Image: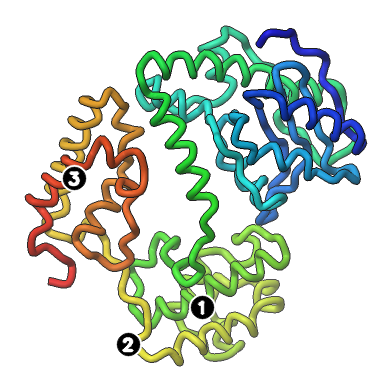
Amino acid sequence: MTKQAKEYLFITTQDQLDRYCQQAAQAKVLALDTEFVRTRTLYSKLGLIQVYDGIEIALIDPTCDLDLEPFWQLLTQPSIVKVLHSCHEDLEVFKKYANRLPLPLFDTQIAGQFLFNGKVLGFGAMVAQELGITLDKGEARTNWLKRPLTNNQLVYAANDVKYLLPLYHKLNDQLQELNLQEYNLAEAAYKVEQKRQDKDTSLLFLDFGTAWQLKPRELAILQELAAWRLSVAQERDLALGFVVKDPTLITIAQRKPSDINSLKNIPEINKQELRIHGDAMVACVKRGKALPIEQCPKRVPRMTDHPEYKQAFKTLKQMVLQAANCANVPMEMVATKKQLNQWIKATWHMAYAETPDFTASWRYKILQQTLNDWTEQYALDKSDEK
């Protein structure tokens, strides 16, 4: 920062927004944050957008009648690095409200994981550790949709980007010293690309932790129920659990009720769910039961049921750890347990295997030889179809 930040600018008019965005478009780096409310809803309700260009902190009020297009254009301007901390929910907000995602992106939480042995730090903890500043979290539970916002609330929001920018500069310098800057930006870009992809609604049943217990016919019913529930949640902007809870859908798939009276006998279903959604849920059951058995989803395999899994996983983890150490990258950033399992599932051609993260990101540079060596040892003639 070459200039000291002015007092925050609370933007409530189009003229203010246009002028600020013209100024911000000249910046090389923008610190961004959002404040939102999400309790019973599927989507976050945007209450405030914070921006800091190194000159002035802007707090944009999206509840006013503003055309936010000038700001949305900044998100995708390639000459500006956008800085966020723990970007997941912010990306969801940007996708929902603008159908645009920020690139290039620098996520300070991801950067911290590269620098601090994979440790995940919240924003306040990282600011305290790296900048020696303790942030006041007294307004953390604010209803950001309620107006007017108090000065204390606005200062709290402004601080989230006020300290994000110097944090970026410090972490970026450390990453450059360790030659980790490329990996850090690539990981953030990969997170953006993952967020860009919409989920396959036909595979929503895989999100149920006990789906592995179900038979193909039951999975066909659950497949119908899960897709139906999502459509209702999207239409009414309700969190999935406030439409019908997961255990209830599992029980319906197992019991296969053919009519409303049969549905009433399932204790997990309350009267309100029965009244509002009873007919629709019975219709889902009927569609699932009518599906030819050869078209029903395959049973969901459990990795732990495979006789070779335990040793194969242990070996892969050890080999990946060695490769990560050689590359001077924390193991936690190179491979999570989920990513290790992705590779094993794909190599063993197990049902519902995803394209492994390893093959579609910066990790492959580090792991290519390791994965080839592991595959030679464990993949030959090994499949759950055997």
Query: What residue is pinned by disc 1?
Result: 224
Q: Disc 1 to disc 2, how far (Cα)? A: 16 Å
Disc 2 element: helix
Please report contact status of discs 2 and 3: CB closer than 8 Å, yes or no: no
Q: What amino acid is found at the position of numbered circle 2 in the picture?
A: Glu
Q: Position of residue 279 (x, y in %)?
A: 64, 85
Q: Nearer the viewer, residue 184 or 340?
A: 184
Taking 155 as reference, is 298 left or right? Answer: left
Q: What amino acid is found at the position of numbered circle 3 in the picture?
A: Leu
Residue 75, relative to residue 223: is it above or below? above
Q: How is the image coloured?
A: rainbow
Which disc number belongs to residue 294?
A: 2
Mark earlier in primary sequence (3, 1): 1
Query: What residue is pinned by disc 3?
Result: 371
Q: Position of residue 351 (x, y in %)?
A: 28, 68
Q: Disc 3 to disc 1, how far (Cα)? A: 37 Å
Residue 63, relative to residue 107: is it above or below? below
